[in-house]
Structures are given as structure tokens and as C-alpha cells.
Image (tube, grey):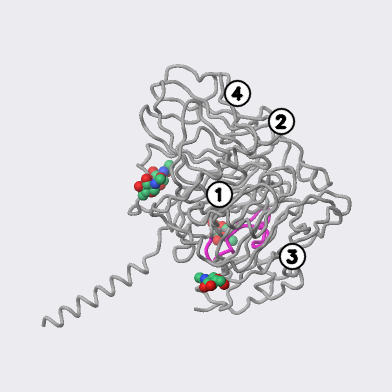
């Protein structure tokens, strides 16, 4: 009898375990209507891209491992795609929303993204990846909260604010595209926006945020702009850094932060000053021109306007480099980690490949183009990932047209080709970004989080590895490179798929400064990569082709 009971107990325990394993993570459903609308953030009416009538678009508030389902209706007159800055889409580059992985959503139709924010926490944003649509909006915040039982290394803030800052042009995205297509450069922006607005700073601006005295708030600041690094600061208040690009950091305090293109920072701000209004300021960095915007933060018991004396931005890039070096990963904070098994002790892993990425500007057919290692990327009519999956990749592109260690970078007659690097699944690689130009660069890699181990002036050589931070570099998805400097990142290529590596300067991105990294699982197994979703509408040459045999377990 006792034996039977305990067997029953065992069986029900096993069943319970199976149920726990099978229980699906929660789903969040969204329906988004993408339309044109008119906005005048700089006082000049202009055409913008709205999502559900909003500019910026709606915030997504999710929790680690949530499944996100977004049905996007494209009411524009052009094909459109959204991409998810910093979301890793593990095993699933099908949802990345780049032209190398997805057919753009034709005008007048809809497409549903299905993705999981697997093992991620932190602050992200989404943006349009097609044409120059990003110049018209279509972006918004995306936050991933820690699960309830996972301790967060700071007390729950009173509220959680998203602050999207970015430079802004009053020209329409079509005019900007035409300008770039005709071979002319982008030129300087017309202003800076904070959450789609540009404060006048005349004491009459509607507050963007309010704080209760004595309480602490989380501000998630992302640079969603096209061209400029921005410095962000709040009058009279220090900012305690707690997270960047999805990693909890050592919690240093800063007077101001340089937020480079595509990067996100979370800071805690305590309302501990005299009760009145304060300005937050976002201003351009490393430019001859000076553009800025303010936003009002109000204390709920506030008496009086903000002081018109705005805090100054720091000068020069040495300051910015020092700030980068002060960023450290909090090694003891428990959090969803991107690669829980391997890369925690990333400093002890042998590098199997070094890829040097050299940015350059040049011409092709007399027109301005930007390049990586002499190649300026163009997207073929069939997305690279689809062509590869259907076995017709060789009709559109060759792997490895660029060298890992480029010697001479020609400025003229750049090679305009689809630029795809084939990389080996699970290799531990080092990517060096070498910037020989006089302007600051910002880079981003999709599908991954990498260790940003060094930025230094000059040229890189293997000897520089002794200067890497091999202990507590922050795991992140974006990195800046100062003029005539280099940056090094380390990562394990354990996420199979086709992933975009790009300049986050949007004129450079649009005119070819990007490439794709193809990482195939040799096992062709579902454990490593998902099959193409059944509901995918195909385009280009693969439209109507029979699907290749699916990957199996
Ligand atoms: C976001 O989600 C979290 C967790 O579900 C919830 O506590 C919080 O109130 C939400 N915030 C907003 C602004 O909806
Ligand atoms: C388009 O929207 C309809 C209605 O919501 C939905 O049933 C359909 O699955 C969507 N199509 C795609 C390709 O996402
Ligand atoms: C790191 O996280 C731990 C654990 O949550 C926390 O106690 C600690 O204060 C954090 N360390 C720093 C330096 O921010
Ligand atoms: C790394 O390479 C060194 C030298 O080739 C070798 O001795 C060591 O065992 C390798 N370490 C690992 C973890 O593979």
C-alpha cells in the first residue's frame, strides 16, 4: 500500500514537472496601424509615420520570456518593416525585421511578428528598417521587466519613464531618401527631439514627467536619432546608472551621459531638490553645430519654473572615452543573462576568429556610398536569409567578399554588393571596429549581446589585447568608435541565423555601411534554429518555390 502511494506520488510529481516545463510563457498581443500623419515638432508641419496615431509609437511593456505577437498593418504607400533594437530573437532571425531576413510588408497589407524576449531584461526600442522611414518616426520604446522572483539590484522605483532622444530633420523621409539616392549627403539635422517634442525652454512647456518629492524614478534613455551622439543631463540631479542595453551595471552616479546612436541607458533619479521644475537636456556632441532640446520635469509639490540656466555638455571626446571606461557590468546581480553557460567568464575563452571592420566613405558611379572593408552593401530583391534557406543563395550573393583583415581601403569605385560573412556556429570571435575617419561612429549587431572590452585611440594590433577588460565589460548590443580610434568586442556566435551588423548612422546604413553575418547550425536542428514560419508571405525568386524540408529535432 505504502509502495503504491509513493509510486502515485512519484507519478504525480513527474506529471507536475512535465506540466511546469510545458506551461507556455505568457503572450502579449498588439495590433498596430502604421499610417502617415502630420506633426510639427519643430514648428514646421511635416509628414510623419505614426503607429496607432502616436508619435513616438506605443511603448511595449513586457517581462522576460514573454511571447510578443504584433500584427502590423501597413497603411503607407510603400513597403515597410519594423525591427527590434537589441532584441535577440534566439534561433529566430525570421522575426528580426531587416531587409536581409524579411520580405517588406507591402503597402496595404499586414504581417504578424511573433517573438519571445527570451532571457532578456532591460531597455530597448523598435524602429522602421526600410527606406529612410526612421527619419519620419515609427519608433517607440520596448522594455523587458525582470520576472517577479528574480531580484533586481535596486529598489522598485516609484515609476518607470521612457525617454527617446534623437536628432530630427524637418524634411520628409521621401525627400531625404531622394537626396541620398541622388548622391548628396544627409546634411545637418534641424533639431533634437525628446519623446517627439522639442521644448522651447520658455517656462511654458508642458511637463513631460512629474515626480513626487523624495521618490526615486527610473528613466530609460535611448538615442533613436539618425546621425548624432547626444549628451543627456537633468538640471540639479545626478543620475545613477543601473542598466544599459539589457545588462545591470555597477551603479555609478553621473552628471551627464553620452548616449550614442542606438544605445539605451537606465538611470535612477531621486526627487531630492527644491520643489520646482527642472529641465532635462539632450544636446548634440562632437559636432560643429550645436542643437539641443529640453523637457520639463515637474515636482508634484512644485512651486515655480525651471531655471533658464542649462547645464553645459562636456567638451571633446576624451571625456566620453573615460565615461565608457567607467561602465562596468554588475557581476553579482542576478539577471537573465544572454548566454548563461558560456560567456560569463568570457575572458578565459580562446578567440577563434578576428574580424576587423573598417568604415569608409567613397563613391560608386560618382555617387556617395559608405562601406565596410571596401564593400558597400545592397539588399538583393530576395532577402538573403530566404535565398540561403531555399538553397538559391548563390544566385544573389557570395559569402566573404570582404577580408577579415583588410589592407587597402579604396575610396573610389567601392564594391557595391550584398555583403555577407559566413561564420561558424558557436565560434568565439573578436570584432575590431577601426575608425580611420574624423567623425565618431556607432555600430550595432542584431541577434546578440557582446562584451565591449575596449575602445582606444590609434590603430589596433594584437598587442592591444592586453588592454582589454576581460573581467566585467558590459554585455551590450551597441558600441561607439571615436575618431581615429578602434573598439573591440567579444562574443560567442551561438545564435544561428542571418544577422545584420550596421552603422547606426542612418545615412551610412542606408548607403551601404552594413553587412550580414550568416551563422548556420551544421546539425540543421530545431534545437539551434526555427523553421521559416508557415504564415510567411514570400517575395522575390523564392515566391512560389516549394519549402525545403523542415529542420527536425
Ligand atoms: C508594466 O508591466 C509591469 C509588470 O507586469 C507592471 O507592474 C507595470 O505596472 C507595467 N507598467 C505600465 C506602465 O504599464
Ligand atoms: C492579417 O490580419 C488578419 C486579421 O487580424 C489576421 O487574421 C492575419 O493572420 C494577418 N496576416 C498576417 C500575414 O499576419
Ligand atoms: C550589484 O548587484 C548586487 C545584487 O543585487 C547589489 O547588491 C549590488 O549593490 C550591486 N553592485 C553595484 C556595485 O552596483
Ligand atoms: C586556449 O589556447 C591555449 C593555447 O593554444 C591552450 O593551451 C588552452 O588549452 C586553450 N584553452 C581552452 C579553454 O581551450
Which residue is nearer to you in this view: 444 or 474?
Answer: 474
Outermost top residue: 304
- Distance from label 3 to label 2 (Cα)? 37 Å
Q: Is residue 508 above or below residue 171?
A: below
> What is the secondary structure assignment of the residue under circle 4?
loop
Label drawn at residue 200: 4
Q: Quadrant of residue 495?
A: bottom right
The residue shown at (71%, 30%) is 289
For label 2, the residue is 289
For ligand 1, the image quadrant comes to top left
The residue shown at (35%, 54%) is 150
- Distance from label 1 to label 3 (Cα)? 42 Å
Q: Which of marks 4 and 3 is in front?
A: 3
Q: Position of residue 358 (x, y in %)?
A: 72, 55
For label 1, the residue is 32
Over which residues does the magenta segment extend? 89-110
> With 85 as the anchor, is 176 left or right in this view?
right
The answer to whether one can see residue 406 in this image is yes
Q: Position of residue 149 (x, y in %)?
A: 33, 54
> With 25 as the anchor, is 355 left or right in this view?
right
Number of labels in the image equals: 4
The residue shown at (32%, 69%) is 19
Mark 2 vs mark 4: which is more N-terminal?
A: 4
Label 2: how many residues lie within 10 Å, few (<14), some (14-19) or many (20+)? few
Label 4: how many residues lie within 10 Å, few (<14), some (14-19) or many (20+)? few
**Does the magenta segment cover residue 112?**
no
Mark 4 vs mark 1: which is more N-terminal?
A: 1
For the residue with label 1, is its CB less than 8 Å from the closest atom of ligand 2?
A: no
Mark 1 vs mark 3: which is more N-terminal?
A: 1
- Distance from label 4 to label 1 (Cα)? 31 Å
Mark 2 vs mark 1: which is more N-terminal?
A: 1
- Distance from label 4 to label 3 (Cα)? 49 Å
Amino acid at each position: 500500500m505504502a509502495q503504491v502511494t509513493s509510486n502515485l506520488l512519484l507519478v504525480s510529481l513527474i506529471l507536475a514537472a512535465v506540466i511546469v516545463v510545458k506551461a507556455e510563457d505568457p503572450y502579449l498581443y498588439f495590433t498596430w496601424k502604421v499610417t502617415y500623419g502630420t506633426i510639427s515638432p519643430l514648428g514646421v508641419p511635416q509628414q510623419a509615420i505614426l503607429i496607432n496615431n502616436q508619435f513616438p509609437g506605443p511603448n511595449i511593456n513586457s517581462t522576460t520570456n514573454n511571447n510578443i505577437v504584433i500584427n502590423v498593418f501597413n497603411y503607407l504607400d510603400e513597403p515597410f518593416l519594423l525591427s527590434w533594437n537589441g532584441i535577440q530573437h534566439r534561433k529566430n532571425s525570421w522575426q528580426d525585421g531587416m531587409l536581409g531576413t524579411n520580405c517588406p510588408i507591402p503597402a496595404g497589407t499586414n504581417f504578424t511578428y511573433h517573438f519571445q524576449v527570451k532571457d532578456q531584461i532591460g531597455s530597448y526600442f523598435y524602429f522602421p528598417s526600410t527606406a529612410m522611414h526612421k527619419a519620419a518616426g515609427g519608433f517607440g520604446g520596448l522594455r523587458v521587466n525582470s520576472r517577479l522572483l528574480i531580484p533586481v539590484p535596486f529598489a522598485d522605483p516609484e515609476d518607470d519613464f521612457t525617454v527617446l532622444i534623437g536628432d530630427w530633420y524637418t524634411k520628409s523621409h521621401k525627400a531625404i531618401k531622394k537626396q541620398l539616392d541622388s548622391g548628396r549627403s544627409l546634411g545637418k539635422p534641424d533639431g533634437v527631439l525628446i519623446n517627439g517634442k522639442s521644448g522651447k525652454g520658455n517656462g511654458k512647456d508642458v511637463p513631460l514627467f512629474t515626480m513626487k518629492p523624495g521618490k526615486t524614478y527610473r528613466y530609460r534613455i535611448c538615442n533613436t536619432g539618425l546621425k548624432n551622439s547626444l549628451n543627456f543631463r537633468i538640471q540639479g540631479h545626478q543620475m545613477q546608472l543601473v542598466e544599459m542595453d539589457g545588462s545591470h551595471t555597477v551603479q555609478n552616479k553621473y552628471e551627464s551621459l553620452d548616449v550614442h546612436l542606438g544605445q539605451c541607458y537606465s538611470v535612477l533619479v531621486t526627487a531630492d531638490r527644491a520643489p520646482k521644475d527642472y529641465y532635462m537636456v539632450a544636446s548634440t556632441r562632437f559636432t560643429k553645430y550645436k542643437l539641443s532640446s529640453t523637457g520639463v520635469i515637474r515636482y508634484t509639490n512644485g512651486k515655480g519654473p525651471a531655471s533658464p540656466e542649462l547645464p553645459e555638455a562636456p567638451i571633446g571626446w576624451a571625456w566620453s572615452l573615460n565615461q565608457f571606461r567607467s561602465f562596468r557590468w554588475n557581476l553579482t546581480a542576478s539577471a537573465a543573462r544572454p548566454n548563461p553557460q558560456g560567456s560569463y567568464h568570457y575572458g578565459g575563452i580562446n578567440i577563434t576568429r578576428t574580424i576587423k571592420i573598417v568604415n569608409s566613405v567613397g563613391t560608386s558611379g560618382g555617387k556617395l556610398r559608405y562601406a565596410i572593408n571596401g564593400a558597400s552593401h545592397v539588399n538583393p530583391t530576395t532577402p538573403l536569409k530566404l535565398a540561403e534557406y531555399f538553397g538559391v543563395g548563390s544566385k544573389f550573393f557570395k559569402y566573404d567578399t570582404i577580408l577579415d583583415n583588410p589592407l587597402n581601403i579604396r575610396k573610389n569605385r567601392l564594391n557595391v554588393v550584398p555583403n555577407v560573412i559566413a561564420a561558424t556556429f558557436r565560434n568565439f570571435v573578436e570584432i575590431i571596429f577601426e575608425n580611420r575617419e574624423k567623425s565618431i561612429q556607432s555600430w550595432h549587431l542584431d541577434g546578440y549581446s557582446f562584451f565591449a572590452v575596449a575602445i582606444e585611440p590609434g590603430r589596433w594590433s594584437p598587442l592591444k589585447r592586453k588592454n582589454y577588460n576581460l573581467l566585467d565589460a558590459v554585455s551590450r548590443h551597441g558600441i561607439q568608435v571615436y575618431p581615429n580610434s578602434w573598439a573591440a568586442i567579444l562574443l560567442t556566435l551561438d545564435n544561428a541565423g542571418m544577422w545584420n551588423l550596421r552603422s547606426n548612422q542612418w545615412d551610412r546604413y542606408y548607403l551601404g555601411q552594413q553587412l550580414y553575418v550568416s551563422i548556420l547550425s551544421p546539425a540543421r536542428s530545431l534545437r539551434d534554429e526555427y523553421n521559416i514560419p508557415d504564415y510567411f508571405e514570400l517575395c522575390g525568386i523564392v515566391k512560389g518555390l516549394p519549402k525545403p524540408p523542415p529542420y527536425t529535432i
